[in-house]
Amino acid sequence: MNDVNKQAGATGYDSDTLAVRTGVLRTEFNEHAEAMFLTSSFCFNSAAEAAERFANAEQGFVYSRFTNPTVAMFQSRLAAMEGGEACMATASGMSAIMSLVMSTLQAGDHMISSRAVFGATSTLFGNIFSRFGIETTFVDQDDIAGRKAAVRPNTKLFYLETPSNPLTEIADIAAIADIAHADGALLAVDNCFCSPALQRPLDFGADVVVHSATKYLDGQGRVLGGALVGSEEVIMGKVFPFVRTAGPTLSPFNAWVLLKGMETLGIRMERQSANALELARKLEAHPLVSKVFYPGLKSHPQHALAMKQQKSGGAIVSFELAGATPEAQRELAWRVIDGVRLCSITANLGDTRTTITHPASTTHGRIGAEARAAAGISEGLVRLAVGLESPRDIHADLMRGLDAGKP
């Protein structure tokens, strides 16, 4: 097989070129499009070769739980786009986070996470890993001093999302990397909202980049997938042995779909980000909207930092609706969401179709009211993941929803 990634990744191509040209393994048929290898196992020329492959003494494919050509193409492409040495694909974004923690920490270790993380991530850290002796301290997204104060002798991992879900809070990757590395810990950054088209955390000192490939890497809401990108030492030395044994495997079919989605990542993110900025500006002027959360707006408290780390503000816009009580806020938010006709009411994001959801009762509904309040997620918050439709049509649909929310 001819590995096109080796020739492209070494010559400094731009991200858009890497998204189209890297990570291609061609068979003897010399196909132009990536091949899909739907096989559970691979044959060997001899018993000795099989032994060498199983012992990792010889490179080659063994079993699709941990080695598959289509998955390897996805891994090579994403590693090239993120500027990492290696990538390990997983079945979903959550399985990527699980694989990271289970392969780099053990019972008695401590990690520091931003409070502003996806609801399932918060539950995984606070409720599930704690049962196995891994303790997590949650710190506000922009609290650098709080992170320093939270460090313990057994702190092994710092974790953050930037921008965060759903409030698009920005974390200073370089500053947090300095704190983590001063104490011998790793820094992992969830790059789901930006993707490598808009942000490359490794360039700012992160050790591992976490992806829910389900979102923007696919871009059309078709399949689940996850990935971790970083150094050979971390990804192949620590994560790979865990994934090989535990089996949170990305299917070859899903990998093939993700490969095709990544080819249009750059142009999708550019257009969706432009649409999001236009809508965010219009939402700021609406009387029912008390606050808009979007890093591309100059009113965002971390706008300057966002523009330093990101190429644009991204495609996620959250906005808050005023209300005298939490119950009144929720009622208003639900009326607005139920009033739209074009936007899809679903908690997924990263799709070409605009989606709208109420985080307090969906993505962050299981973390409890107290934890939501600490994270700033009110009952009046609505999250919009802006798609590729005409911004005029998306705006008209939102106005339909907001008109339905008027008393």
Image (tube, rainbow, N blue to C red):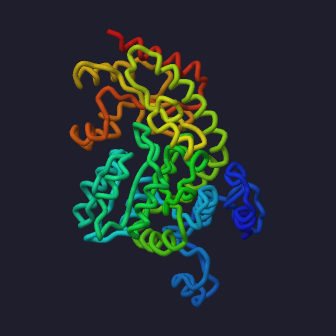
Above or below, 54 against 391 in this view is below
Above or below, 364 against 122 in this view is above
Residue 248 screen position, x and y as percent: 43, 62
Q: Relative to the observer, which residue lies in front, 383 or 249?
A: 383
Q: Relative to the observer, which residue lies in front, 96 or 317?
A: 317
Residue lying farthest bottom? 48
Residue at x-position 47% and y-position 21%: 283
Q: Is residue 349 left or right of residue 14?
A: left
Residue at x-position 29% and y-position 58%: 150
Above or below, 265 against 204 in this view is above
Residue lying farthest front? 145
Residue at x-position 42% and y-position 33%: 346
Q: Relative to the observer, which residue lies in front, 364 or 56?
A: 364
Residue 360 screen position, x and y as percent: 30, 34
Q: Is residue 66 left or right of residue 13?
A: left
Where, quadrant-wise, is the N terminus in this rendering? bottom right
Residue 9 screen position, x and y as percent: 70, 63
| Number of marks in picture | 0
Q: Is residue 37 visible?
A: no
Q: Is residue 254 left or right of residue 149?
A: right
Residue at x-position 31% and y-position 52%: 146
Q: Is residue 177 left or right of residue 330?
A: right
Q: Is residue 393 visible?
A: yes
Where, quadrant-wise, is the C terminus in this rendering? top left
Residue 299 screen position, x and y as percent: 47, 29
